[in-house]
Image (cartoon, rainbow, N blue to C red):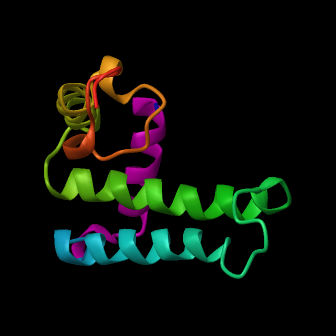
Amino acid sequence: MTQKTIRQVLKFRDDRSWSQFHNPKDLAISISLEAAELLEVFQWSAEDTRCEEKMDRIREELADVVNYCILMADACGLDLDEIVREKLKKNNEKYPVEKAYGSKEKYTELKEKGKA
């Protein structure tokens, strides 16, 4: 995501004077609610791993989640690039390629390849 896009999201908020309502608690709630709406796209679907016919709703709900994440980062004074890089570093340590490649196991369950 570009800084230009982030600025557009913040401008949309600021043009409406909505930052007064955007405290971390309410933004966290909004992120959770929008994530639930994204999950709802797959509710009761026979093939829950397919999404081609649902792409319009997925795009819209995912955009809502991302927009609220941008607003949350701004409200908390966090740099999105920085926090994502930090998390990637931690995940790289938890899930080294030689252990995690092709595995869905949680990091606490990973074993060296070829070892039982």
Q: Quadrant of residue 83?
A: top left
Residue 90, placed above or below residue 56:
above
Which residue is pictured at 67% across the width and 71% down the height? 42
Quadrant of the image occupied by residue 30: bottom left
Question: Farthest residue in the right direction?
Answer: 53
Front-most of residues 35 and 12: 35
Q: Is residue 101 left or right of residue 86?
A: right
Residue in the picture at 77% in, 56% down: 50
- Give the image location of residue 6, x and y in percent: 41, 42
- Residue 46: x, y in percent? 79, 73
From what the image shows, is residue 99 above or below residue 67?
Answer: above
Compared to 39, does 86 lie above or below? Answer: above
The one nearer the camera, 103 or 113, is 113
> Where's residue 31, x and y in %?
37, 68
Looking at the image, residue 112 sits to the left or right of residue 31; the answer is left
Tell me which residue sits at (55%, 56%) in the image: 63
Q: Please tell me whether the stretch drawn in magenta is mainly helix, strand or loop.
A: helix
Location of the C terminus (image quadrant): top left
* Segment tinted magenta in the rendering: 2-20
As drawn, which residue projects farthest toward the left?
77
Residue 15 is one of the magenta-drawn residues: yes
| Relative height, residue 8 to residue 51 (above, below) | above
Q: Is residue 73 magenta?
A: no
Residue 88 is left or right of residue 1, and the answer is left
- Where is residue 45? Give x, y as percent: 75, 75
Q: Residue at x 17, y 44 (%)?
A: 78
**36 or 20, which lies in front?**
36
